[in-house]
Amino acid sequence: MNIQLTEAEKIKVLNSDDIYSIMQKILLREQKIDQNREHFWVIGLEHNQRILFVELISLGTVKKALVEPMEVFSLALQKRAVKIVLCHNHPSGELKPSEADKDVTDRLIQVGLIVDTPVIDHLIISTKSYLSFIDIGLFAELEKSTKYVPPYVLIERARAESAKIADKNAKIEIAKELKRRNTPVETIAEITGLTVSEINQLRVRKK
């Protein structure tokens, strides 16, 4: 269900406080009917960080709301949001993320990368306060997770990392040879792309 926003509410988002200032009003409005149920919203953002839409994705039970990636990203793709913020409430007022909260965030982060519509934060809110996954460092932790990364993506990442290492090793060997020839360090750096510090640390045997 699309949440109708006034032009004044389509603010430019600079931090989690900005998101909460809008979502708190929406929560208070919706809780008149379903105050004891979890609501899960997606906030779509434009290139300039301005709010494009707020969509209610799921209306769950007292303790959880079921969330499917297709429902989360379908509107974002249709409306061409460049990034999204996840948001849901805890009717109890307790803001600590549950394992289920972490799990769904982990999954949606990975799907967002695949469809090129990144998730940039997840807020858990109540009528009086909120918690941001970014602010407490949890988001960065989940970004490193590989639980929901498809095998083909892991393979591509491994190949890219291997190619990067091979390229770095090749540059090091070239730098060593140039160093044996007493080539100026600045010239070696320009040719190989290595830093002066990296080149100075290379040990070579004179031929």
Image (cartoon, rainbow, N blue to C red):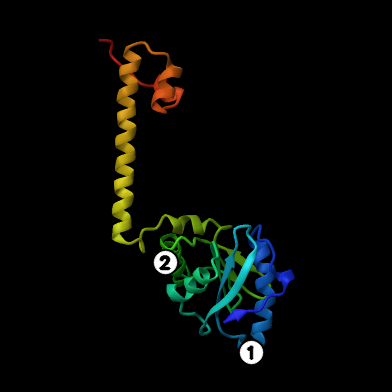
> Which amino acid type corresponds to the residue marked 1 in the rendered image?
Ile
Residue under numbered circle 1 = 33
Q: Is residue 169 left or right of residue 121?
A: left
Q: How many labels does the image show?
A: 2
Q: Position of residue 81 (x, y in %)?
A: 55, 65
Q: How crowded is mark 2: few (under 14 residues within 10 Å), some or many (20 or more)?
A: some
Q: Where is residue 119 in the image (x, y as percent from the top left)?
A: 51, 62
Task: Tell me what residue is drawn at x 66 percent, y 77 percent.
Answer: 26
Q: Where is residue 61 in the image (x, y as percent from the top left)?
A: 51, 85
**Quarter of the picture holding the N terminus:** bottom right
At mark 2, the secondary structure is helix
Name the residue at the bottom extreme: 33
At mark 1, the secondary structure is helix
**Quarter of the picture holding the C terminus:** top left
Residue 198: quarter of image: top left
Q: In this view, does 15 lie to the left or right of 185?
A: right
> Which amino acid type corresponds to the residue marked 2 in the rendered image?
Arg
Q: Is residue 102 above or below residue 31?
A: above
Residue under numbered circle 2 = 107
Q: Which of marks 1 and 2 is nearer the N terminus?
A: 1
Q: Is residue 121 visible?
A: no
